[in-house]
């Protein structure tokens, strides 16, 4: 049997059972670089997924801890959608994907990994991005580091914020 070593996933796997950890979205710090935040508004922020499905996998997160869309006010919803739109634009510019999955998983049975803090996933997609490694080995190969992804996206979000605010 061959092994693909991914030691950075240990914290994720080890924390998969037992007591629920504090909300990962509520415990972001001002150190945006360490937290992988690529853009921050007054009511929401855009963060890289620490365990991405593809390079560029983003999440748009309301700053306030809310479990669903119904719990948000109009101003929060407007900013969440603005950052979701900008995320689509940034991914298209930076990665030129052939498609983008945009989704919200409400509740653990619906697939939410962080069930009580709403977040919108944006995953860039390309024809054939699910190759033999994914199908046979149940493993994703990502050619770009999270730091490189952040460095590629931050300037685009800064420009969008200036140009479209």
Image (spheres, grey):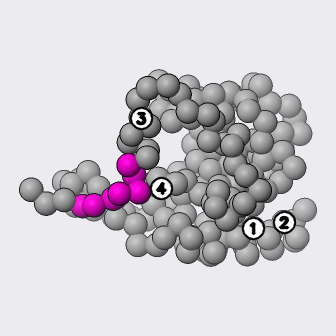
Q: Residue at x 74, y 32 (%)?
A: 65
Between 160 and 152, the residue placed more toward the observer is 152
- Is residue 87 positioned above or below 105 on the image? below
Crowding at label 4, few (<14), some or many (≥20) Cα neighbours within 10 Å? some
Locate residue 110, reporting x and y percent: 49, 28
Locate residue 100, reporting x and y percent: 54, 57
For disc 3, the marked residue is 16
Tag 4 or tag 1, which sits nearer the N-term? 4
Secondary structure, mark 2, is: helix
Q: Is residue 125 visible?
A: no
**How far is disc 1 from disc 3 in space, using C-alphas?**
32 Å
Secondary structure, mark 3, is: loop
- Magenta residues (range): 4-10
Crowding at label 2, few (<14), some or many (≥20) Cα neighbours within 10 Å? some
Locate residue 12, reporting x and y percent: 43, 44
**How far is disc 1 from disc 4 in space, using C-alphas?**
19 Å
**Circle 4/circle 2 CB separation < 8 Å:** no
- Is residue 23 positioned above or below 33 on the image? above
Q: Residue at x 72, y 60 (%)?
A: 31
Q: Which mark is residue 161?
A: 2
In the picture, measured across the screen, residue 138 lies left or right of residue 152, that is left
For disc 1, the marked residue is 157
**How far is disc 4 from disc 2 in space, using C-alphas?**
24 Å
């Amino acid at each position: 049997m061959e092994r693909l070593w991914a030691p950075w996933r240990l914290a994720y796997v080890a924390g998969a059972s037992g007591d629920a950890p504090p909300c990962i979205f509520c415990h972001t710090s001002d150190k945006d670089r360490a937290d992988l935040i690529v853009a921050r508004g007054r009511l929401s922020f855009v963060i890289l997924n620490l365990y991405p499905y593809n390079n560029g996998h983003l999440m748009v997160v309301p700053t306030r801890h809310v479990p669903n869309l119904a719990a948000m006010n109009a101003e929060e919803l407007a900013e969440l959608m603005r950052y979701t739109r900008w995320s689509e634009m940034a991914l298209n510019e930076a990665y030129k994907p052939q498609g983008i999955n945009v989704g919200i998983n409400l509740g653990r049975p619906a697939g939410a990994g962080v069930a009580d803090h709403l977040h919108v996933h944006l995953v860039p997609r390309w024809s054939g991005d699910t190759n033999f490694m994914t199908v046979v080995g149940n493993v994703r190969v990502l050619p770009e580091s999270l730091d490189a992804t952040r460095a590629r996206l931050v300037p685009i979000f800064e420009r969008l914020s200036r140009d479209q605010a």
